[in-house]
Image (cartoon, helix red, strand yellow):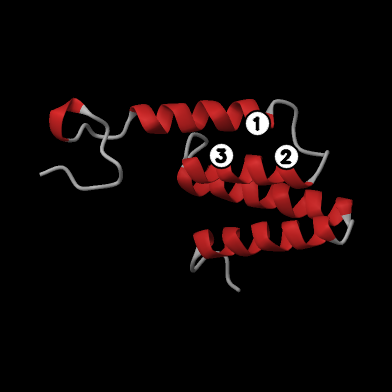
Amino acid sequence: MDKTKDPLAYGETLSALAILRAALMETDEATMLFKSCLQLRESVLGADHPAVATTLEKWAKHLPTAPDGALERARRIRVRAEAQKPLGLHGRKAAGEPVP
């Protein structure tokens, strides 16, 4: 797969392979794959994108090699993303629905 043609799909592949390697107890390989996935998503989507939070959460769930504070950083990203959602009817956060 060419990461330059579809970097987001490539990131998904890296994440899936990292989880597989972690399940096979191949910690070094899994760590390298999670690092690559995180770096790719940060460079393409920005450091505060929810996909970055997902990568950090998966890394922390599957390996003890996740960066210190990974879950706290993921939580902060998710809180900021939620705060940036547009308001829906009656001033409530929209649940993924377009605001009329």
Mark 1: amino acid: Leu
Which comes before the other along the chain, label 1 or label 2?
Answer: 2
Quarter residue 79 falls in: top left
Which comes before the other along the chain, label 3 or label 1?
Answer: 3
Q: Name the quarter where the C terminus is drawn.
A: top left
Q: Do callouts 1 and 2 mark residues in contact (Cβ within 8 Å)?
A: yes
Q: Which residue is depicted at the point 82% across and 58% down?
A: 23
Which comes before the other along the chain, label 3 or label 2?
Answer: 3
Estimate how packed mark 2 is, as few (under 14), some (14 to 19) or many (20 or more) residues with alpha carbons within 10 Å.
some
Q: Do callouts 3 and 2 mark residues in contact (Cβ within 8 Å)?
A: no
- State the image coordinates of residue 17 (x, y, percent, origin top left): 72, 63
Instruction: Identify the residue position indicated by label 2 in the image.
Output: 60
The tag on residue 85 is none
Q: Name the quarter where the N terminus is drawn.
A: bottom right
Q: Nearer the viewer, residue 62 or 30?
A: 62
Mark 2: amino acid: Ala
Mark 3: amino acid: Ala
Instruction: Identify the residue position indicated by label 3 in the image.
Output: 53
Q: CA distance from mark 3 to mark 2?
A: 11 Å
- State the image coordinates of residue 68 (x, y, percent, origin top left): 75, 27
Residue at the far bottom in the pictured view: 1
Q: CA distance from mark 1 to mark 2?
A: 7 Å
- State the image coordinates of residue 85 (x, y, percent, origin top left): 30, 34
Give the SS element for disc 2: helix
- State the image coordinates of residue 4 (x, y, percent, origin top left): 53, 65
Instruction: Identify the residue position indicated by label 1 in the image.
Output: 71
Estimate how packed mark 3 is, as few (under 14), some (14 to 19) or many (20 or more) residues with alpha carbons within 10 Å.
many
Q: CA distance from mark 3 to mark 1?
A: 8 Å
Give the SS element for disc 3: helix
Q: Which residue is depicted at the point 49% across and 69% down?
A: 5
Q: Which residue is depicted at the point 48% across and 33% down?
A: 78
Give the SS element for disc 1: helix
